[in-house]
Image: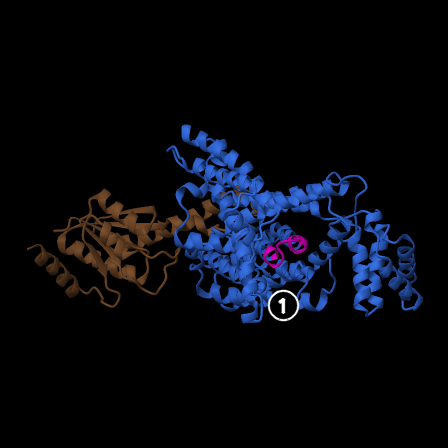
Amino acid sequence: MFKRILIATHGTEGAKKAESYAIGLARAFGAEIHGLYVIHKDLGSLVGIEWLHNSHVRMEFYRHAESEFYLRAEEVLEALGEHAKGIEVATAIRVGEPAEVIAEEAKDIGADLIVIGGESKERSEEYKAKVSIKKLIKIAPCPVLVAHKNLMPSEKNINHCAVGFLNGIK
Amino acid sequence: MNGEKKSPAALIVGIVLLVYALILKRHEAAAIPGFLMELMNYLKAGKTVDTQVGVGIWAGTIISLFGIWNLIQPAMKSKFDMVVRAPMAGAGMMIILAYLCRFYFEPIFKLWGKAAESALGFNFATIFGLNYILLGVLLGLVWVNTIGVPKWMQSGVKTARLAMKMGVISLGAMYSITELRYLGAMSFTMITIFVMGTAILVLWLSQMMKIARPLAGVLSAGMAVCGVSAAVAAAPVVKARGIDMAYSIGMLLLVGVVGLFTFPPIAKIVGMNELQFGAWAGTGILNSAQVAAAALIFDPHTIETLKVAEIFNITRILFLPFIVIILAIWFAKGEEEEEVGKVNLGRIIIDKFPIFVLGFLIMFALSSTGVFTPKGHVLYGKHFYNFKADEKRELRTRDLKKVQAFIESGAVTEPKVKASLEKLVADRQITSTEQTDFVLKAQDFTKDKDLKKVFKEADKKVQAKPKTLEVMREYMMWFFAFGLIGLGMQITWQTIRQAGGKAATIGIIAGISKAVLSFFVVWLFIKGTI
């Protein structure tokens, strides 16, 4: 059924639930997991109304900010690797508009399922950037599973979920 | 950047400007009746038609020429292409926006303000300062947050930074030595107190609320010195994490924007003068670009407020390298011991010193030598205007008799003031720059409003505006209008909504205390005028 599951994560509680779904499904179907961390493209607008520095100072800021955001991304993906112990996990960090990047990445790696967290009020240790789920569903090359914020992905739920998918196929 | 594709954008923008200017010129020269001239009359465009035509032809031609070049050969990655050719389309578009604001929106709001005055009881256009600068910032803000800046405009919008620097550098020519000394001393005192005070307050609050040191560092630099610019300079030094930068810059933008839109109306309502508002805005508004914007919103047609505010702003900017050093040491001490030695002080000062301030100082030095002023003109006192005395500038006999009577009444106790007034009556006008100050001082000895007016009149009559400076001023206003529209286009909701966490609480507390305290300091201690 699923061979390659793309999980987009920012390391928040909501995203961790999504991770659990992805891992559970991967176990159920024997799929591999592909973890993706998206750094928002509007990062550049942080400098915004800054005008008085020379380009050297601005570049130093950009380089610093970039490396900090990458560092955070690596941390999150590393945590995903630990979370998914026993399953093969590939990871990627991409910069861009979240929904677009997720869809593109799914296409590139030939994912047959995208898993993301539902909307939650809690904020990740990152630049605030919501994934437009509506947009993602529209442009994604494969089904999208949005982890419900209140529903814990217990073994039972995941099995239901898997059965649901299988039934849908039949 | 227009990428490797041949872009017609610059040519289109250039032709629009050119065609508009040429049509307007033809209609005006031949006084062709019709919609366009009726519109100009309705807007009371008057003299600005010349400027509209002049700037339109000048800018339109240059942009069209580059537009043709860009159409034949796409802008590549070379430095010249990236800095000059690629931004042409966007820069031209921003000139069009500046046109719209200055020659259309501002006059329209002026008319509406007057029309609604009887119904509202006040002129909303004056109270809210709905002039071309405010409308330009608003237009930029609304534009970027609704339709967004299209790709072909993006590199043009970035030239706003250069325009701001050019604006401040040209402003350097508008100060006299006395003025700079007077404002410099005042700003140095106020800025020292407020920069240190805010930095300490933010660091203390951060410790109270137990927030991470990098976040505290970025936030205190931004809150204390010059907003986003300071945060950008401090972030790498205190090794701020992504979240720290997002929180603090979002917060700084939010507080800055709120300040920008609330300071001018408050000052109008309580009746601040140019010096007071310049000092208040220069101390209390967070982002340095917004200081210039607020000063121009308060007073867009003379530059006195801008002059005061920018001196405060520049003083603040000069503090930046030192604050960054202090933060670097403070941060290194909190880390491991050996880190302290690694802080390279000289390098920080050289790297973080804003070079355009040197341009400002050079312009000031040049101006002091008198290269911009024709012979016979002297820059005097705290005034930007030059001194000129000839027969056409004499006071009326009626007024002189009043002054004579005033001298004879014996109300003037200060001998120097009395001597100056006697000389004024004898010469029928002020004849030296020194005399001006004493004649103006004579106002303190009388309560008669008409007499006070005579003294002011005597001063005004000998003021002459040097042509070169007038032209430079006109260009400078375009630089600022252009720059502020462009910077308005970079205030995105996406950035503001990053504000959050404990940083938001600290930001609000520090931002409000700074604004309120500086208001009272200015209100209580700064009484003079410039």
Residue furthest left as drawn: A170
- At horizontal 48% and vertical 32% (from top left) the residue drawn is B66
Horizontal relation, residue B444 to residue B521: left or right: right
Quadrant in which residue B202 is drawn? bottom right
Q: For chain A, what colour was chosen?
A: brown
Q: Magenta region's main secondary structure?
A: helix
Tell me which chain appears blue: B
* x, y percent for residue A113: 19, 52
Which residues fall within the magenta stretch?
A: B295-311
* x, y percent for residue B462: 80, 51
- At horizontal 63% and vertical 57% (from top left) the residue drawn is B299
Horizontal relation, residue A26 to residue B145: left or right: left
Picture mark count = 1
- At horizontal 84% and vertical 68% (from top left) the residue drawn is B446
B338 or B289: nearer the eye?
Answer: B289
Label 1 is found on which chain of the structure? Answer: B
* x, y percent for residue B414: 90, 64
Horizontal relation, residue B352 to residue B376: left or right: left
Q: Is residue B300 visible from the viewing direction of this image?
A: yes
B387 or B396: nearer the eye?
Answer: B396
The amino acid pointed to by label 1 is Leu
Q: Secondary structure at mark 1?
A: helix
Instruction: Kindly identify which residue carries mark 1.
Output: B517
